Image (cartoon, helix red, strand yellow):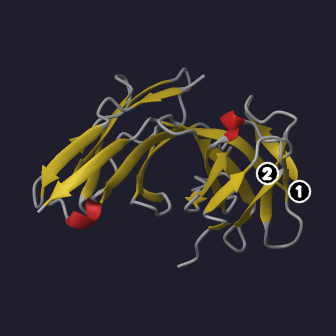
């Protein structure tokens, strides 16, 4: 069964460094998403991406964040200058993009980002 | 803004027994979707069951069923004949037509042999 894959599973970085989290969505899916979960808190929506542009973003997704689909298979989340409070589990998801119907999101296993 | 609340941080159930996980939500929307996702340890979230708000009939998927009470804004998950493989974190989630999921805090379910 097709899966959303995320790499790496655990990323450790120093405060102030740039980090790129990588995701390979399910082939033929059209919508892509990033969510994050700070330890002990709820899973929170960050951004959705469709047709090579951001379709929706939350207040969390400020100027230090960016997303990109650099080729036909990868979807990345870049954090320009990491802060301690960026430490969290980051989940990528994709959905088929069904017009007029329920669009189910499929999740990856997540990347745990630790900012030291 | 929508909020989703899961009031049971942890639950346990004996194998083969039935367990119900609670979820309430708050929204001013009339049309929306509700979901239960399961996250086994160190694995990705998997969709367990979904409910369209305009449907009065409760959704059922094999051993999993929901009790959807739209007026009360309640969406509980019932797992019948619990199996060891049901041990996981369960998330209730809300989605209006924007594709943005709003999650509850999760319920950690332990199925005991």
Q: Is residue B95 visible?
A: yes
Write down the quadrant of residue B71 in the picture.
top left
Q: Residue at x 77, y 41 (%)?
A: A15
* Chain to which the residue tagged by mark 1 belongs: A
Residue B55 in the image, given as x and y percentages of width and height: 42, 42
Please name whichever residue, A68 or B96, is drawn nearer the observer in this view of the structure: A68
Location of mark 1 (residue)? A52
Write down the quadrant of residue B6 in the picture.
top left
Neighbour class for label 2 at 10 Å: few (<14), some, many (≥20)? many
Q: Residue at x 51, y 39 (%)?
A: A39
Q: Residue at x 69, y 67 (%)?
A: A25
Q: Residue at x 84, y 73 (%)?
A: A72
Location of residue B5 with respect to B12 vertically, above or below: above
Location of residue A78 with respect to A24 vertically, above or below: above
Label 2: element kind: strand
- Decide: marks 1, 2 in contact (CB < 8 A)? yes
């Amino acid at each position: 069964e097709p899966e959303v894959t995320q790499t790496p599973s655990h990323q450790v970085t120093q405060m102030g460094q740039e980090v790129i989290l990588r995701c390979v969505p399910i082939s033929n899916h059209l919508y892509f998403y990033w969510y994050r979960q700070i330890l002990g808190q709820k899973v929170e929506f960050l951004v959705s991406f469709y047709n090579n542009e951001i379709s929706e973003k939350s207040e969390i997704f400020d100027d230090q964040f960016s997303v990109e689909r650099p080729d036909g298979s990868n979807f990345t989340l870049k954090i320009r200058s990491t802060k301690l409070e960026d430490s969290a589990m980051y989940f990528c998801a994709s959905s088929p993009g069904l017009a007029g119907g329920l669009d189910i999101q499929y999740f990856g296993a997540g990347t745990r980002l630790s900012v030291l | 803004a929508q909020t989703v609340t899961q009031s049971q941080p942890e639950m346990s159930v004996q194998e083969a027994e039935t367990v119900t996980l609670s979820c309430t939500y708050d929204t001013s929307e009339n049309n929306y979707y509700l979901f239960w996702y399961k996250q086994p340890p160190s694995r990705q979230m998997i969709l367990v069951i979904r409910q369209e708000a305009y449907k009065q009939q409760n959704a059922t998927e094999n051993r999993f069923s929901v009790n959807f009470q739209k007026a009360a804004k309640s969406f509980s998950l019932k797992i019948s004949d619990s199996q060891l493989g049901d041990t996981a974190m369960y998330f209730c989630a809300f989605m209006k037509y924007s594709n943005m999921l709003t999650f509850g805090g999760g319920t950690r379910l332990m199925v005991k042999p």
